[in-house]
Amino acid sequence: MPGKIIVTAIGSDRPGIVAEISRVLYKHRANILKTRASAVGSLFILVMLVDVSSADVSADWIKEEVKEVGVRLGLGVSVEDAEKFRKRKKLIAFDMDETLVEGETINELAKAAGVYSEVKRITEQAMEGKISFEEALTRRVRLLKGLPLSEVEKVKQKLKIASGAEDLVGELKKAGFVTAIITGGFDLFAIHVAEILGIDYVYANKLKVKAGRLTGEFKGVILSPQDKLKALKEISRREGIKLEECVAIGDGANDVILLEGSGLGIGYNPKEAVKRHADALVERLDLRTVLALIGVSQVSQDVAKRLGAGKP
């Protein structure tokens, strides 16, 4: 279906969503062929089939403008090629920190170790892409040297699961999705979160422990941004799922390669470094919003079925 895109928007302001998204499309002479709408609780879901073949700018340009509307209005938005949209998604990979759990777990460890200000400064530089992920992580973990495992356990028990995460994963499992955590965070926490949520796979960095304390070093190699995508490919190959049938969700610069390499990359409360690389953005909404963006909602499924039947 060349020249056609699907725009999905989710939020609480129905008139604002319709007006602002339509304004961008009409401004660039894109033709709205079909609109479907639905309400789920307090949220309004809008799905549009749009012909951009006669638009005065590229589909990528329209995609960026629609994403900007989403950021400004606090919406969940996605823009996909219509052919890509039709392909049922089967696997979803989550980052952990600031996505499945609230906050950065390494910052919580830093508070326990009394080095919070130093670690926080390095974290912010890394998430905005100012220093390499590997350098930042190595420097931060080194500062945790000597922290007792008993303190790590206290941090683990205080982790807050992100709003909507349990419902989201539950619905995904019902829909037959394979689920994974692929994170630059630590296995001590990622395994715990996976057990709570019932997630199938975990790829995370492993901390070295000696005599009941963190050594400030890693066990094995650091899981780099490139390794995150390799992990997704490994899971998809094992499950017999194509990359274009995979969804990835993350918030920081170290997630960009993973987001770009998946079938649908979603920036969740994304840092600036992520916004231009993601297919979809979710701003200030809970994780259940993701269900509509990846087609696990009746209105999205209806549109996909109509496209499959060749109906506008």
Image (cartoon, rainbow, N blue to C red):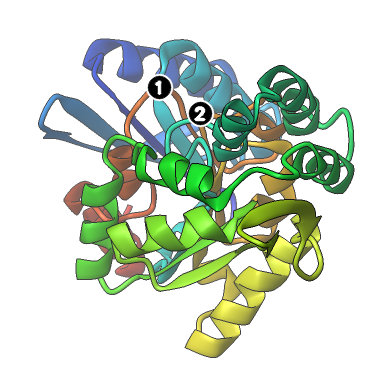
Q: Name the residue type under label 1.
A: Arg
Which mark is drawn over residue 284?
Answer: 1
Q: Where residue 22 appears, x then y in whole percent?
A: 41, 20
Give the answer, above or below, for where 291 lies relative to 111: below
Q: Residue at x 34, y 70 (%)?
A: 177
SS category of the residue bearing label 2:
loop
Residue 310 in view: no
Rate crowding at label 2 as few (under 14), some (14 to 19) or many (20 or more) other CA atoms within 10 Å: many
SS category of the residue bearing label 1:
loop
Q: Where residue 47 appears, x then y in whole percent?
A: 32, 39
Q: Name the residue type under label 2.
A: Asn
Which mark is drawn over residue 269?
Answer: 2
Q: Where residue 198 appears, x then y in whole percent?
A: 30, 66
Q: Quadrant of residue 119?
A: top right
63 or 216: nearer the viewer: 216
Q: Where residue 72 appears, x then y in whole percent?
A: 50, 11
Q: Residue at x 41, y 17 (%)?
A: 74
Q: Residue at x 43, y 33 (%)?
A: 102
Horizontal side, residue 25 vs residue 274: left or right: left
Q: Residue furthest front?
A: 211
Residue 198 in view: yes
How far is the residue under mark 1 from the one under mark 2?
6 Å
